[in-house]
Image: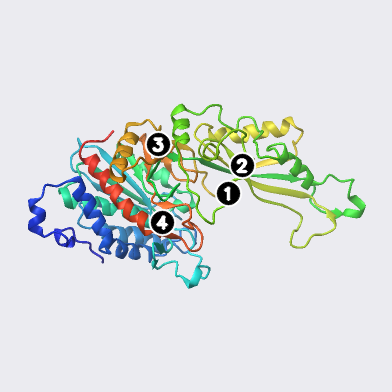
Amino acid sequence: MWRQPLDASIWPTRTGRERDQMQPSREGAIVRAEECFDSGRYLDALRRLVAIPTESQMPDSQPALRQYCREIIPALMEGMGFDGVVHDNPVSRFGPVYVGTRTEDPSLPTVLIYGHGDVVRGLAGRWAGGLDPFAVTVQGDRWYGRGTVDNKGQHLIAIEALRAVLAERGRLGFNAKLLIETGEEQGSPGLRDLIIQQRTALAADVFIGLDGPRQTTFMPEIKLGARGGIAFDLVVHLRDQAHHSGHWGGVLRDPGFVLAHAMASMVTQDGKILVDGWTPRSVPSSVRQAIAGLVFEDIPGLPEEDPDWGEPGLTKAEKIFGWTSVIVLAQITGHPDAPTNAVQGEARARLQIRHTADVPAKDFMPALRAHLDARGFEAVQVIPVTERDVFGAARTDPHDPWVGMVVDSMTRTAGRAPNIVPNSSGSNPSDMFIEELGMPVLWIPNSYAGCNQHGPDEHALASLLREGLRLMAGIWWDIGEGRQG
């Protein structure tokens, strides 16, 4: 079993006597975090995490997920004063959850720290140059491997920054709870039930998670929640059989055209949403202010926006972080692989909505049903997708005191203010923690948009990992100094 020591000898740049003579300091904690990276200890630990093929979407993943929670994380946390418990998932076919707790004083603030140990499919054989998805390969500033950014490399930052503060000060100065789940890549099934079951054990003053990409490589970032996601099928079933197009074309209603017209009634040819109730009636001023201050970076290889697509008058940032979007994931009628000369009996499409907390998820399907019926599309069925947990929309107010504290800390460490993103454009379980535990949720990402997350060639930028260690050491130190919200 891997053991990580916690004594001064692992930081060779200062002797034990020199360190004993120095007063513990914020800069000292940051230096320790830097040395963790520069010495190669962070990379060694990351290699051990990535080597476990925790592909939660694969049917045979349970042994790896259990090993990660029961062996790998406890070994990583050894010597840090955390009492660890591994909870079975309330939904039996999904992976477990590790919860580690360090209580220094019940009167101190408590921080719930989040990460996920599962990854998407490794896609071995599709990586450039024969790269192994479950081995970290260093090529300059890029560290390749499945989980280097999503999410093993990122929760490792949180843990090693905690270690740096403990080594520098001898204590954190706050109570910490570390939650590592293993089902995030499947929508966190069972996590809400576990939170409800363990509400007292997971109670905290603030949630801080590390996940996702930043908008830029040159400035830090904080995200305050996530847009929600809803998937549904539109189905036009007119008859059980297809019929000869020569005999019946122009006589029988064509389900493909019926579906096409129904979808055209929902979104204009320029992408403006026409379904009443799908877009926000208003956006809080604090959210509008945060969006207006966002800085983006053009990453080579990523597409450029279509400026005339979507809600007129909105900026790119407003469309992504403050509005609703709907896309077509798939659409079919007949047999595209072998078209036949026949009027088809059925057409269907799968669509996905992404929305902010300003539009309740429960309103979307009734609004769509009313929209279609009012336009004569009663034959178009609306079928919610239940194959994967729907992820909810949630957001912490940008003016929350905890946000201000973390922004101040990041600014102090980085020398510049971070991007404040009111909600992630991707999915995460923010809603579960906000709704069930009633705490502000903050995410601090340490990746970038070009990291190939979820695809072949996923990679971290070493420079961002090192910066992340610095930022988190500063945040943990400042919370322990009583700078909390």
Nearer the viewer's eye, disc 3 or disc 4? 4
Residue type, label 3? Ile
Query: What whole-number distance in Å separates the C-alpha atoms at marks 1 and 2?
Result: 9 Å
| Secondary element at image label 4 | loop
Residue 340: where, in percent of width, then height?
Answer: 82, 59
The residue drawn where x is 71% and y is 45% is 235
The residue drawn where x is 17% and y is 60% is 13
Residue 82 shows up from this direction: no
Residue underneath mark 4:
149
The residue drawn where x is 27% and y is 61% is 38
Residue 198: where, in percent of width, then height?
Answer: 33, 42
- Asked if marks 1 and 3 touch (Cβ < 8 Å), the reply is no
User: Which of the 4 quarters of the picture holds residue 418?
Assistant: top left
Residue underneath mark 1:
304
Residue 80: where, in percent of width, then height?
Answer: 21, 53
- Asked if marks 4 and 1 touch (Cβ < 8 Å), the reply is no
Residue underneath mark 2:
307
| Secondary element at image label 3 | helix
Residue type, label 1? Glu
Instruction: Name which of mark 4 and mark 1 comes first in the sequence.
Output: 4
